[in-house]
Image (cartoon, grey):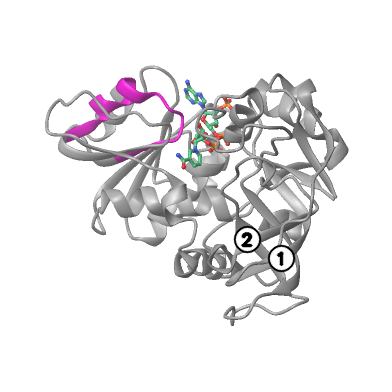
Amino acid sequence: MRAAGVMEFGGPEALRIVDVPDEPLGPGQVRLRVAAATVNPTDTYSRSGAYAERDPVKTPPWVPGMDVAGVVTEVADGVEHLAVGDLAMGIVVPFGPHGGYRENKVLPGNSVVRAPRGTDAVHASTLPMNGLTARLALDLMGLRPGQVLAVTGAAGAFGGYVVQLAKADGLTVVADASEADEQLVRELGADVVVRRGDDVAERMRERFPAGVDGLADGSVQDALVLPAVRDGGAVATVRGYRGDGSRGLRVFPTLVRRVAEDRAALDRLRQQAEDGVLTLRVARTFPVEQAADAHRLLERGGVRGRLVLTF
Ligand SMILES: NC(=O)c1ccc[n+]([C@@H]2O[C@H](COP(=O)([O-])OP(=O)(O)OC[C@H]3O[C@@H](n4cnc5c(N)ncnc54)[C@H](OP(=O)(O)O)[C@@H]3O)[C@@H](O)[C@H]2O)c1
């Protein structure tokens, strides 16, 4: 069966079509005929070998990819919420050849829900992983309606969902943007938009002199953004940063794997997409044979909306 993966870790050019065996269907699992698989920043780290040490599989090929959408082709006993023929979306926790860039994928039933009504597989695939990460970041910070949340990288996939979910939760949102992204970030619902950059915390403080109650750091600026947050405030980080221990800040490294089988959360995201709370943004699609080109484009930066591989 066809997948896009690497036989040797490396740059985008290492990605090629590889042959992988079918995955057996176990109890509580579902099989999708994958029509769309997103390309996320983390996939570039998988591809380059940054996760090789923690991957239990030590032989090639390694297949990246953390979310997929497609038609359900098999449902194991015990899975009641999906039926063969449903268009569904799911989050993948990749290891070895078991990433999302494959034409056929078995997933835990609790990692898969119906695609939002009215969307196609390409759009649906952009929701599970970043939507769940955004939800988890907000839940870890636990802000109350009316409190102020700052979001960096707000034009990105994670940041954009944080902005939209935070508004739905009743928070006031201050978000960063380049001049070119300002309109986009406003349309996502940010109440206040400040210019992105190394001085983003200062700009946020200008607008909220007491400091914000929480901050979701989608641009991974780590220590640079902490001054935006009031003493004792919350910070959600997405690449492991744990803060500097200062001012009673509560820093929450956010790992989506923790919630990869939270079906209720995934289904709520589906509902919020159907309700127009969440916007599913696609930058461009690539046939899976061109996965290397998609990685090149993502690594260049500036992509707005997700890149999606199609099968
Ligand atoms: N831990 C987890 O479970 C988890 C889950 C999901 C995502 N993540 C991580 O979250 C991060 C964001 O992911 P994403 O998919 O949202 O990426 P994305 O779509 O590329 O968005 C990132 C945004 O941040 C901006 N940015 C990057 N560097 C910046 C800087 N120094 N100053 C200001 N803005 C900057 C980018 O702008 P440009 O495009 O112009 O550079 C882009 O708008 C990635 O590192 C990803 O690996 C982690």
Mark 2 and mark 1 in contact? Answer it, CB < 8 Å: yes
Q: Quadrant of residue 183?
A: top right
Judge from the rendering whether residue 215 lies leftward or rightward of residue 279; answer left or right: left
Q: Amino acid at mark 2?
A: Leu
Q: Earlier in the sequence, mark 2 or mark 1?
A: 1
Element under label 1?
strand
Q: Position of residue 168 (x, y in %)?
A: 41, 61
Side of 42 relative to 210 (left or right): right
Q: Horizontally, is 57 left or right of 228 in the view?
A: right
Q: Residues within 10 Å of mark 1 (few under 14, many from 20)?
A: many
Q: Nearer the viewer, residue 241 or 175?
A: 241
Please give the residue where the numbered disc 1 appears in the rendered image: 31
Residue ID at (55%, 62%)? 111
- Tag 2, which secondary structure? strand
Between 97 and 118, the one nearer to me in the picture: 97
Taking 25 as reference, is 146 above or below it? above
Q: Is disc 1's CB within 8 Å of ligand 1? A: no
Relative vertical location of residue 230 with respect to residue 120 in this rendering, above or below: above
Q: Judge by depth and name the residue closer to the eye, 294 or 174.
A: 294
Give the residue drawn at x 61%, y 31%: 46
Classify mark 2: residues with Cα within 10 Å, few (<14), some (14-19) or many (20+): many
Q: Which residue is mark 2?
A: 107
* Range drawn in magenta: 215-230
Placement of 3 over or under 117, stated as above or below: above
Answer whether residue 75 is magenta in the image: no
